[in-house]
Amino acid sequence: MSSTESMTKVSLSVKMAAISEQWLEIEKAEKEKRRELVFQGPAVDDKLRACGGQLPPALFTLSLLNYLEVSGCSELRELGDGLGLLSHVQSLVLCRNKLQRIPPALGKLQALRVLDLSGNELEELPAEITRLSDLCTLNVSCNRLRELPAGLERCTKIAGLNLSKNCITEFPPGFLCSQLALLASISAADNRIQELGEEIGLLQGLKSLDLSNNQLTDIPCELADCSKLKEINFTGNKLKDKRLEKMVNGCQTKSVLDYLRVGGRGGGKGKKTENAVKEDVKDKKKKRERKQKKDSGGDEVDPDEDLNKMMLKILHISENSSPLIVKASASTKDVRQYIVCCVVRGMNLKPGNALKRFLAAQTKLHDDICDKRTLATIATHDMRLVKGPLLYDARPPKDVKIVPLGRKEILAKDLVRQLQFEAEEQRKQKKRQNVSGLHKYLHLLDGKENYPCLIDAEETVISFPPITNSDKTKIWKSTRDLFIEVTSSSSLQICKDVMEAIIIKMAELNKFTLENKEDVVCDSEPEPDVGHQVPAACQIPETETGTQLVVEQVRVTDIEGNLKVLYPSKTDLNLATSSFLVVR
C-alpha cells in the first residue's frame, strides 16, 4: 500500500469518527432504548453539513423509535434509503427543512400514522406513500408540489389532509370517494385548483374544507351532501355565480350550503335539486304540524321526562349586560391560530370528589378527542378570577411570564427549559422513554419562535397552551362558573367539537354529583380573592337543585373588532340525544 493510500484511509477513518462523535444523541438514544428523538434548529446544521446534507445512517438503526422529528434544519436536503428500517415509527415530523426528495423507502413504514413534510422544497411525493395504510394525518403544505400521487385513496384511515401553499391544479382521479369515510379536514388553500368534482359529496365525514385562493369558477351542489360539513372557505376564487361568490366571502357555512342545496340562482337544474326542494318543503310542513299539536294540547308531554334531562340554557350576547370579549391577534396564525371560548355557569364542585372527577375528565378528553393535545388543548378557569377583555396573542418566550399550576412565576422559556430537564431526569430514573405530566407535551412547541398565550386586562398571562394555564385562575371547590378556552393549530371545527365534548361531560358530572348526594367537603385552602360580581342575568342560585347549566356566548374577534367566531352559535350544541334539553 502506498503512503498516499494509507493517508487517505486514515483521513477517512478520522472523518467518520468525527461524524460519529457529532451525533452523540443517536448513541445515547440507542443505549437508553428511546422511543422518541428530536433534532431541530441551526445547532443540527453543522452536523448535517458534515454528512453531506443527509441524516446519518446510524439514525436508521434505532428500530425502537415511534416518534422522530427533524425540523428547522436548512442543511437537510435528503433522507437516505435507510429510512425504511424505522419500522415502528408512528409519527414522522420533517417540517421546515430543505428536503427536495422523499425516498420510496417511505412506503415501508407500515406503522406510520402522522407524516409532516411541510415547509420543504418537494416537487413530488413518492408513489409508495399510498402504501401507508394506517396513515391518519398528512401535512405537505408549503412545498412546490404540482400533483398528488394516484391511489392516495388507499390510505383509508386518513382524517386530516393539509395541501396548502403548493402548485396543485387538481385532486387525483378517484381520490374523492366513499372509501375515505374518516376524512374530516381538507386544507388546500393557496394552490391552482381549477375544479372541484361532484365526488366531493361522497366524503360523508368531512367537517372542514378550505379551498381559498385557488382558481375555482364553480362549487358543485353535491358539496351540500356532506352532512357533517360545518366549516368552508372559498374566498379568493372567481366564481361565475356572483351571488355565490358574495356569499362565500361573507356568509356562514350553513347559508352557503342551503344555497347550493337548491341549486343556486334560479332554483338550479336537475332532478336532485327538485327532490331537495321537496324534502325541505316536507320538513317545514312537519314542523308546522308539530307546533300546532303542541299549541292545541294535542301532544301529551311527560313532565317527569324533562326533569330527568340535563338542561343547557344558552345565554345570548344580547341578554348579557357584561359579555366577555376575546380578541385574537394576527401573530397567532403561524403558531396556534384557532380559539373557541365560552362561559359555563352552575357547576357544583363542592361535594365529595366532584372536583377530582372534573379534572380527571378533562385529562381523559386531552388524551382521547384531543389526541394527547396534538389536535387541541382545553384550559378551564374560575370565571370569578378572569378579568376581561382578554387578548389571545403570540409572543417571544422571553416575554411570556406565567404562574403555572402548582409552580412559582416563571418566564415561558425558563419553564420549557425546566420541564425539559425534569423530563430527562424522569427518563433516567424510570429507565424508559415515556414521560408523564406536562413533560409529554413539550415537543408541541419545538421550533416555535413565538409562544401562544391568553392575557387578561391586567396584562397577566392566564393560559400558555398547550402546556399549562395559570395558577391564578385555577378551579376551586367553590368554583361555580368556569371560563373555558379550546385552542388548536389544526382547525376551528376541532375546537368546536372539543368544546361540545367538555360541555356534555360537565353536564353529566353535574347530574352525577346531584344524584349521588355526596357530603360537601370543606376545603382547607383559602378562598380565592374575587374582584368582581357575576351579572344578574347569569346568576344561578346556590340552592338550585336541578341539572341546568347556563352556557354563555363568548365572542372572539380580531384586533379591529371583526367577528372571528361566536360560541355557541345556532349551529353548535345541536345534541341528537334524548338525555339533553337545550334551551335557546
Image (cartoon, grey):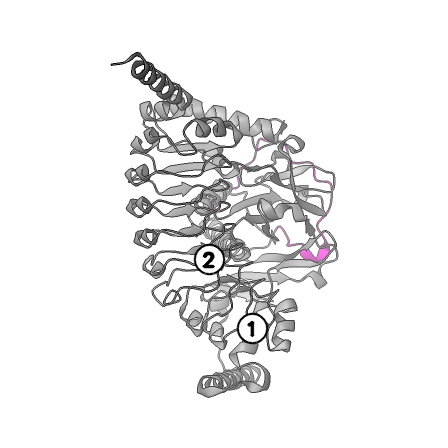
> Is 449 drawn above or below residue 125 in the view shown?
above
Q: Position of residue 516 (x, y in %)?
A: 45, 49
- Specify the segment rendered in magenta: 518-542
What residue lies at 69% left-to-right and 53% top-to-bottom? 558
Badge 1: few (under 14), some or many (20 or more) residues near its Cα, within 10 Å? some
What residue lies at 32% left-to-right and 15% top-to-bottom? 4
**Quarter of the image containing the N terminus?**
top left
> Is 379 drawn above or below residue 525 in the view shown?
below
Camera sees residue 298:
no
What residue lies at 45% left-to-right and 72% top-to-bottom? 197
Question: Which amino acid type corresponds to the residue marked 1 in the rendered image?
Answer: Thr
Left or right relative to 274: residue 564: right
Q: Nearer the viewer, residue 9 or 180?
A: 9
Question: Disc 2, disc 1: CB below 8 Å?
Answer: no
Numbered mark located on residue 146 in the image: 2
Q: Give the number of the mark in front: 2 or 1.
A: 2
Does residue 539 show up magenta in the picture?
Answer: yes
Q: Position of residue 571 (x, y in %)?
A: 56, 66
Res 457 quadrant in image: top right
Q: Nearer the viewer, residue 533 or 91?
A: 91
Numbered mark located on residue 461 in the image: none
